[in-house]
Image (cartoon, rainbow, N blue to C red):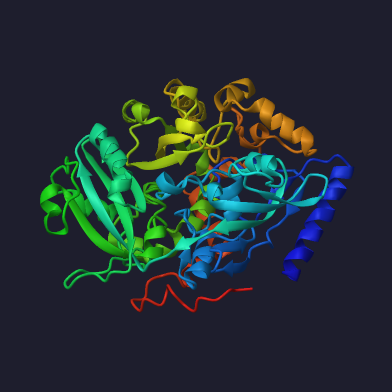
Amino acid sequence: MERHHQAVRLVSSTVRALFERAEPYRIWHGSTNSTRPPHQKAGARLVDISGLQHVLAVDVARRVALVEPNVPMDRLVESTLRYGLVPPVVMEFPGITAGGGFAGTAGESSSFRHGYFDENVAGVEMVLPDGEVVFAQRPDGGEGSEYADLFRGAAGALGTLGVATMLELRLVEAKRFVRATYRRTSSVAEAVKVVREECTPEKGNDYVDGILFSKDHGVVVSGKMTDDEPSSGEKVQTFSHAWDPWFYLHVRELTKGLPSSASSSSPSPSSTESRGAVSEYIPLAEYLFRYDRGGFWVGQAAFDYFRPVPFTRFFRWFLDDFLHTRMLYRALHGSGESARFVVQDVGMPYASAEPFVDYVSDNLDIWPLWLCPLKTPTGPSFHPHLRSSPNQGEGGKGGEMLNIGVWGWGPKNRDAFVRVNRDLEHKVDELGGMKWLYAHTYYGESEFWDVYGNRPWYEALRQKYQATSLPSVYDKVKVGTDTRQEGWRPWLKSLWPVGGLWGLWKGIRSRDYMLHRRATWKWTGTGGEIRGQEKKMV
């Protein structure tokens, strides 16, 4: 811990010096999973916390881990699985960090049970804007939680109230496998209904999400952790190796010939296919990171860009190093193609899900779409949450929403691209939804605060903790309607295939592909990935 304390003292002294000079700053983490244009940070004073990237301790008895903010999900899972434990919410891209999950919005297939990632954080060490180091604890409705207002405000506030330097993260028991069941649906309404059905306590699921390949081909994926071995004749399915299928292609192939599951009863193992469902066993870590190869399905866009290269299993194998999410993010930013690729996640009330999918189909024609059920907090919050107070849930316990992931090519024309995103924002607002703030956000300032609705609360916290010299959440997320950059580089990268090749070079130079090659969470068939010696790691 002494190394950690020394690093935090350095961050604290840097922040204090900037505070005394009233200089605003941004935080440098060393990586990003945001799709906002990187040139927006150009010229900003940076506080470098990229070295805070270690799992400091795992306490098996208390089921908590002390984690520095730049620990990515794959390293976190590797560290906790040694003790038979796993975080309740694990972001499905291995490179997303614990600090990013706390300061941003992270909801995954276990979030219908456990909420957003930050709702499983018990406390967070923070360097305040004046350099003071404090430990803010989750309120949890109890008395005496220190800095409880800061904790609640900092969750999802994108580092605008201070710098997170350590998280105390809750853990749950891990098991060797996830028994995944894929239920075929034949309409959007049926898919939404089945998602809600699979989230009920009676189903006993640990994970639920869904993929809409089209209006008449949807699949709801549910998963239960288990230590049971697959029965004779059942194979263990993996997704991390170069010749493995991409998860969404695998699911599409398994279900394309199935009838609609259209049944509210849970299918028995012997009759799943006849009821429009099929099941298989997936090692736990392979399940958690099942969307890494291909970045859900966004990786197919790389083949669209380099259109002479066919989208075949051979070339997915041959180019595998470039098709993991870390490398895809490098290429997306390096190429400049994020300026014309629609990447939006929106939290919608369940009643609005089908109208929103109809809108996306009619106006964007983007498929597949991701469905992820969420247990949402009450406001105020920068996370998507139910905005109408009558629907907030009983006893101030929040509510339920359905996240819909919309990821695909937009118009090539810059003005048309902005217009498409603005129209989507208006539709989301009209239907009572809220966007996630990692992506392109075009709201005007007053419009932004009308949607997120917590400005007095947020500004009071900024005053209380002397954060007014820092960029606000709106400052950090807004993408101007004219983000064209001057000079020859943007022009050159706009010429095919220069931008794509430059993005590939940026990825190769980063050597991020080595992180997956060396990952120890990948299934080897021995079962040693879970349940090493259960002892306290210090």
| Picture layout, residue 270 above or below residue 26 | below
152 or 3, which lies in front?
152
- Residue 385 in view of the camera: no
Residue 351, horizontal then vertical, whole percent: 34, 27
Tell me the quadrant of the picture where the C terminus can be found. bottom right
| For residue 339, side relative to residue 167 (left or right) | left
| Picture layout, residue 487 above or below residue 221 | above
Residue in the picture at 31% in, 52% down: 204
The outermost residue toward the right is 20
Tell me the quadrant of the picture where the N terminus can be found. bottom right
* Quadrant of the rendered image containing residue 165: bottom right
Residue 402, horizontal then vertical, whole percent: 39, 37
- Residue 459 in view of the camera: yes
| For residue 469, side relative to residue 416 (left or right) | right
44 or 131, which lies in front?
131
Residue in the picture at 20% in, 69% down: 234
